[in-house]
Image: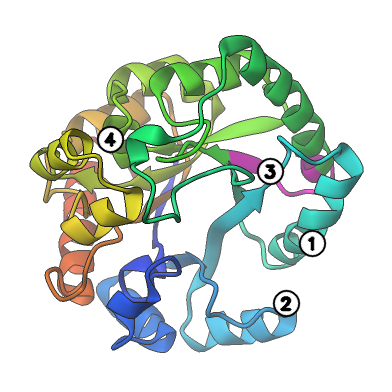
Amino acid sequence: MTIKIGISPIAWQNDDLPDITAAYSMEQALEESREIGYTGVERGQRMPKDTDGLKAYLDKYDIALCGGWCSGSTLVNDFDDEVAAIREQVAQFKALDAPCIVYAECSNTIQGDQSVPVNDRPTLSRDDIRAYAVKLSEVAKWSTDQGMPVAYHHHMGSIIESEDDVNWLMEYSDPSALKLCFDTGHLLFGGGDVLATLDRWGDRVHHVHFKDIRPDVVKDVRDNRRSFLDAVIGGAFTVPGDGCIDFHAVGKALKGMHYSGWIVVEAEQDPAKAPPKEYSQMGYDHIKDVLTANGLEF
């Protein structure tokens, strides 16, 4: 049972809020991530698009591709259209030995719209999520058959945000096809119970995001009807060990479920308030402490 520690470059290069990270480069993100000790990085939009170019880029910094975001549209697409939309990414990630694509439904998400409060996200009924899960399972099975697992990322501002949403998606989807990208910060921000959800769906967890939250900022975002992007700028998210989540308890749960795979720091915030290398070092050190204390090899 071995854990690998990776990071998303979003602290240095925010794809949704490029202005706040304009003073930083993707090259700096990879160089500093590797200096800290991270051995993998999730794909960012400002990395080379072609497979050979991306491989050479990552090899230059001696860092692996440990997954990456996939904007899905299964809710509105039929099977053939969705497969066509993700085929290139699936093939690229397989060629580069990535552990999964990190899939989220984006056809109607409001996560990137700063004019819409995160409270006003689209929601589906249990029956609607059941129907969505059936469609998504077909797409996930296709990708899995290509050799690339699909790990679903529950995300603020989207149709799968709350603990109930996650429960229903997992309950009605094909367990052999659709896996879970378990994100501590998004689950707690969405009102969910981190440990209860991890305990319930531990056998479906294929990828883990360690993200902490600052509850006072989250409360302000909820109470004053701010957007998801406002939450990011305001500092709702931070690295593990800098917020309120008990990652030692999460580590104990991962040990109990014999988790083996990547733990990825994904903590987007304003670099003017939280210098990326300093905070990424803090997150890495905390993860090492958590893994060591819980007897997890890394």
Query: What residue occupies the far right of the structure in this picture?
Result: 80
Instruction: Give the residue type that dot 3 points to.
Output: Pro
Task: Mark 4: give few (<14), some (14-19) or many (20+) Cα within 10 Å.
Answer: many
Query: Which residue matches tag 3?
Result: 149
Q: Position of residue 225 (x, y in %)?
A: 25, 39
Is disc 3 placed on a helix, strand or loop? loop
Q: Where residue 91 is drawn, which disc sits there?
A: 1
Query: Which residue matches tag 2?
Result: 51
Q: CA distance from mark 3 to mark 4?
A: 26 Å
| Residue 273 painted magenta | no
Which comes sooner in the sequence, label 1 or label 3?
1
Which comes sooner in the sequence, label 2 or label 1?
2
Q: CA distance from mark 2 to mark 4?
A: 35 Å
For the point 55% across and 66% down, the residue is 65
Q: Do callouts 1 and 3 mark residues in contact (Cβ within 8 Å)? A: no
For the point 51% across and 26% down, the residue is 123
Instruction: Give the residue type that dot 2 points to.
Output: Thr
Q: Where residue 189 is drawn, which disc sits there?
A: 4
Q: Nearer the viewer, residue 213 or 28?
A: 213
Q: Do callouts 2 and 4 mark residues in contact (Cβ within 8 Å)? A: no
Count numbered badges in the picture.
Answer: 4
- Chain part drawn in magenta: 143-151
